[in-house]
Image (tube, rainbow, N blue to C red):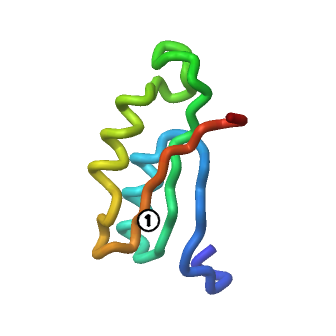
């Protein structure tokens, strides 16, 4: 994305901690939402239940000088 001049993106998937770290290092902007199916942490992809997702949002929302924004990411509500 950087090579093509893209400076910001939205991602709604899994393992958002890694994505957030890369965004912070690369200097990009991003809206990150950890995808939740509502199945319980033991069955969620990446093992992140709702509590883990809320903790991710609290940790990363507004990080990297405000370049990272986070949201809840329910899948097929």
Q: Residue furthest bottom?
A: 5
Image coordinates for residue 45, horizontal then vertical, percent: 57, 27
Residue in the foreground of this view, choosing between 52 and 76? 76
Image coordinates for residue 12, horizontal then vertical, percent: 60, 49
Residue at 44%, 56% in the rendered image: 70
Q: In which quarter of the view is residue 65 placed?
A: bottom left
* 34 sits to left or right of 5: left
Image coordinates for residue 26, horizontal then vertical, percent: 43, 72
Looking at the image, residue 27 lies above or below residue 33: below
Looking at the image, residue 72 lies above or below residue 76: below
Task: Give the residue at mark 1.
Answer: 23
Q: Residue furthest right?
A: 76
Q: Secondary structure at mark 1?
A: helix
Q: In which quarter of the view is residue 74 placed?
A: top right
Q: Residue furthest front?
A: 77
Q: How many marks?
A: 1
Residue at 32%, 65% in the rendered image: 62
Q: What quarter of the picture does the C terminus occupy?
A: top right
Residue at 57%, 17% in the rendered image: 39
* 72 sits to left or right of 24: right
Looking at the image, residue 76 lies above or below residue 29: above
Q: What quarter of the picture does the N terminus occupy?
A: bottom right
* 16 sits to left or right of 6: left
- Residue count near mark 1 (Cα–Cα under 10 Å), binned few <14, some 14–19, many ≥20: many
């Amino acid at each position: 994305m950087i090579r093509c001049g893209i400076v910001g993106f939205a991602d709604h998937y899994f393992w958002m901690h890694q994505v957030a770290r890369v965004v912070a290092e690369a200097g990009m902007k991003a809206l990150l939402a950890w995808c939740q199916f509502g199945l319980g942490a033991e069955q969620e992809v990446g093992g992140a239940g709702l509590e883990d997702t809320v903790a991710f949002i609290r940790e990363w929302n507004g990080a990297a000088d405000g370049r990272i924004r986070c949201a809840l990411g329910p899948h097929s509500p």
